[in-house]
Every structure is written in C-alpha cells, then in structure tokens.
Image (cartoon, helix red, strand yellow):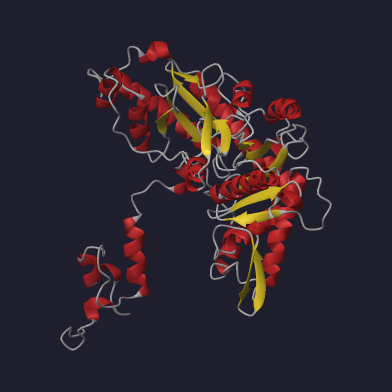
Amino acid sequence: MLDQKLDPNYRGGDAKTDVFGSDAMLQAAPVEKIPAGSTTEQIAYQMVKDETFAQTQPRLNLATFVTTYMDEYATKLMNEAININYVDETEYPRIAVMCQKCINIMANLWNTPETNKWKAGALAIGSSEACMLGGLAALKRWKARRKQAGKPYDKPNLVMSTGYQVVWEKFCNFWDVEMRLVPLTTEHPTLDVEAAIKLCNENTICVVPIQGVTWTGLNDDVEALDAALDKYNAATGNEVCIHIDAATGGFILPFLDPDKKWDFRLKWVLSISTSGHKFGLVYPGLGWVVWKDKKYLPEDMSFTVDYLGAEVTQVGLNYSRPAAQILGQYYQFIRLGFEGYKNVQYNSLMIARYLDRQVSAMEAFEPYAPVELPNPIFVWRMKPSFQATAKWTLYDLQDKLAQKGWMVPAYAMPANIEQMVVMRVLCKQGFSRDMADMLIADIQFAVNELNKLEYPTPTRIAMEKNLPLKTKSFNHTGK
C-alpha cells in the first residue's frame, strides 16, 4: 500500500486518487474564491455535475420552450464546433455562408418576396435579441421618415397585447419607446385588433402580433391586423408596419398550416423574428430575424470592422457568439427536410391536443380557451365551480408534480385577468405519447391526494385573502 507520507498528493487529487476518496469531496464547492490549487479533470467534472444532480431532467421540463432533445449526430456536430466563434468569419468563412443559407431557408418558409440571392436577415443569440433587432429597425425607419418630413421624433410608441415577452419591455426601456398595451381578456384571449388600431398614431413605430403567445399558446390574428392597418394607414397617411414575434409559430405555421397568411404575404409585415432553439429544434443559443427586403434593414444597423486582417460586417447587439448552433440548425434543415419538420411538429401538436382532451375531461379542470390548439402548447385552469370549494390551488399541483420529476408551471395571467391562475405544458420533440400518459396519471394521482386535504393549503388561504402568492418564479420570456 502506498505510504501517503511519501506521496502527499495522494488524497489531494492526482491521477491515482479515486474521485470520492479525494479531499475535494470533503470540501464545499467554491463560492467566493478560486481554489488555491488544481485538481483532476474527473474530480472537477464530478463536483460540477453533482451541483446540478437534483434538478428536473431536461426532457421532463415541460415549462421551457427551449429544445431539450437533439439526435446524437446533431449533438456530436455541435460539440465539435463548441470552440468556434462565429464572428471569426475570415477563419471560418464556410460557417458564415452556412448562416446565410439558414436565413435564406427561413425567408422562403415565410414567403419572402425578396429576389436577391442572399435574403436580408440576421443571426441572434435567441429570439430576444432577434426581437430587439426587429424593433430597432422599425424605430430607425420611423425616425428617418419623421426627420425627412421635418416632424418631431422624440415620442415613439409600440403597440402589442399584454401577452408580450419581457424582451419587449426591455426594448421599450432601452430605447425610450412608449409601450401601448392591449389587455388580454376572457372575451379576447388574443390581440384585440380593433383596440390595437385605436392605440396607433403618427408616432407608432409598429404593431407586434405574436405567433405562439407564451402565456396562452394562441396566435394573434395577423391577417386581420394587416387589413385593419391598411385601412388605417390609407386614412391617416401614416405607415404603421408589423413586426411579428414568431418565436414559437415561425417554425410551426409553415409546416402545419402553410396556407395561413400571417407572414410576408401580407402588405405591412416587414420583419419576422423567431427562435431556432425552440421549435427550430436546436439546443439553446439561437435566434433569427428576417426582413421583407433589404431596404427595410437600416444601413446603420450593419457594422463593419477590420477584424483579424479582414472586414467583417455584422448585424447584431452581440459580437462574439457561438457557431455551434448554426451548424445544428443547418443540420436539422438537411436531416429533417420539410416533411421531417412537419412530422415532428405534427406529432408534438397531436400530443398536446391529446393532453388537452384528457386533462379537460377531469372534473377539476378546463382549457384556458375552448379552441383547437394551434400550437403544441396546452394551457388549462381550474373550473371556477371546482375552485370555489377546493382546498388547494394549481401551485400545489405544480409542487406535487415536481415530486415526480415534472416541471409543469402554474402562474397568474397578465394584468386585467391576473386573478386567473393557469398551468401550461410544452410538447416538444422528445416528449412522447407514453410520457404524456405518465404525466396524465401523475396529475390524476396528485389531484386525488390533494382532494383528501382536510384544511386549505397556504396558497389557497392566500388566494382567498387576495394576498401575494409566494411561489416559485416563472419566466414568461419563453426561455
């Protein structure tokens, strides 16, 4: 047996040390200061891995819109490109071309009228940056028109529903744009077009309808909005355009409802943003924005720098960014093709509709909106008659499901209907019918257990007293 006195590093963490026999496993992970010395790769790996061990497994996370499954070849391809910085276009010119190919493919999925070989678009870290770029282009176009007409350009506004993602609040704060909101109501579970038009004026840079609202899973009626804006612009002489936040629907509608007019086929739709890492089926870190024509992308949004001996032109808020997600997106386009994407999205939608039927058939629940689901997103709430006597809330059901490993969020709806609490399930690639049946069984089991309660839960008491509910936070960015 090795004498530890002769080899003082034996337990410290060298190649001869068993991971769980090392001194590192007796110490807390670093919080404030970097460790004084080094350890082995195996020990470092295990310590980081252990910190995430108790989390929900990604494929059981039905709260996130983000892709939690890709096949082994896609994963391998992305891992092999993990050390590539996309902005190094001189060193990796084929990836820059690949990025533009992806933009072309999406522009044509959205029925672009642009005839240039390379369509006007940009890569983004996620749909949030893509939204920022679309909004910024609309703001700059509006300012340019106002300046040309000799009119003030200091009070821009933007119109959308209260079902917005938080990125739009950030956009308006960052660039001093007034946010004009149309409330979601039980009568209008999506954007009320008539109310939206009433909020428009000469300072409106754009209206932002959403395809796949994160709160509800529903789609705003873009065709009706476009027709209403056409009449409004003709009557007022204004040029209020549409930017579509299609973070979800941008990769659903072209495959499952290709005849639906929501995209560049409509007159006032000038830009569309989407998330490649949602239903684009790529791991996190990818967004896209496409303009109807190059003329709608202001020239001063393109920055050219002399970088590593060559001129690099880029549209984006971020500079350095990973290239791996571009390879992942292009791989998915080649691997799946139109039919493959259609099949994956169709299966996800059918499973969501199956969950809708099964959960809505339970005594306690009803769907948020009594419509056929347009996206693989199912949202439900307690029936008011059941809630009146129940001793528990959907927040308690969320906790019960978490004990089984599921992450199914419960949350209050936005202002005006904030008293309504709902739950939501995202059905994505990797979520099968068998998994759906397991979830349904776990929901029914949890409900049965909650119905046995003799006294109301803290969340139920808080709800009765209209007190703030201290529950786990939920991110409505759709991330």
Q: Residue furthest front?
A: 150
In this rendering, position of residue 421 left or right of residue 162: left
| Residue closest to the eye, 22 or 295 | 295
- Report if residue 333 is visible in the image: yes
Q: Quadrant of residue 412?
A: top left
User: Where 44 sits versus 372, above or below?
Assistant: below
Task: Please indicate, yes or no, whether residue 255 appears anywhere in the rendered image.
Answer: no
Q: Is residue 313 left or right of residue 439?
A: right
Residue, x 21% and y 84% (percent of image)? 2
Q: Is residue 183 positioned above or below 316 on the image?
A: above
Residue in the foreground of this view, choosing between 114 and 236? 236
Question: How many numbered marks, from 0 up?
Answer: 0
Q: Residue at x 34, y 64 (%)?
A: 46
Left or right: 277 with respect to 233?
left
Q: Quadrant of residue 40?
A: bottom left
Q: Percent position (x, y) of residue 313? A: 66, 66
Residue found at the far left of this picture: 5
In the rendered view, tell whether residue 415 sits above or below residue 111. Answer: above
Q: Give coordinates of residue 392: x percent, y percent.
A: 31, 22
Q: Quadrant of the N terminus?
A: bottom left
User: Could you tell me residue 310's position as x and y percent?
Assistant: 66, 77
Percent coordinates x, y for residue 406 in the rendering: 41, 39
- Residue found at the far right of this picture: 115
